[in-house]
Amino acid sequence: LAFLWGLLILLKYRWRKLEEEEQAMYEMVKKIIDVVQDHYVDWEQDMERYPYVGILHVRDTLIPPQSRRRMKRVWDRAVEFLASNESRIQTESHRVAGEDMLVWRWTKPSSFSDSER
């Protein structure tokens, strides 16, 4: 009986952690979309040089260095979610400063996106 009780507590803990991680992933997705969309709007207003933004640059902007190891799983799940479920963001490869890197580009016209915010 004590074993089953312990197993139940362990399962509840694991389910709660999975729910928290999923919620953190969705929050990260929202933040990523905001950064990419804002970058695109800035590019349209000639405040940015390129219409795309590096994926690692977005990560470095959103997650402080001391939290990157802890947030790696959340970040990876958010990137995977965007790649498979978000049609407004395109993943591309570009040569930046002589190095190939993955970037995100906002593909939805900003006139539609302004009304969503």
Image (tube, rainbow, N blue to C red):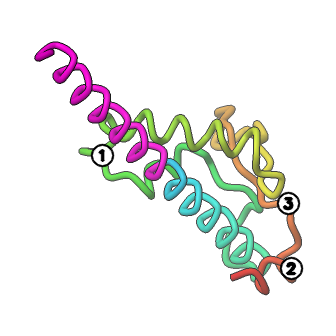
Disc 1 crowd rating (10 Å Cα; few below 14, some 14-19, many 20+) is few
Disc 2 versus disc 3: nearer the observer: 2
Q: Quadrant of residue 79?
A: top right
Residue at which label 1 appears: 65
- Residue drawn at x 60%, y 45% is 55
Can you give x and y, in whole percent of width and height, for residue 15 in the image? Answer: 38, 35
Residue at which label 3 appears: 107
**Foreground pick, 107 / 39:** 107
Distance from the alpha carbon under mark 2 to that under mark 3: 11 Å
Furthest residue to the left? 2
**Is 67 situated left or right of 77 in this image?**
left
**Is 113 situated left or right of 11 in this image?**
right
Residue 3 is a magenta residue? yes
Please provide the residue range marked out in magenta: 1-24
Residue at which label 2 appears: 112
Distance from the alpha carbon under mark 2 to that under mark 1: 34 Å
Residue at disc 2, secondary structure: helix
Of the image marks 2 and 1, the number of the one nearer the N terminus: 1
> At label 3, which amino acid type do we have?
Thr
Determine whether 33 is above or below 45 in the image.
Answer: above
- Residue drawn at x 64%, y 36% is 80
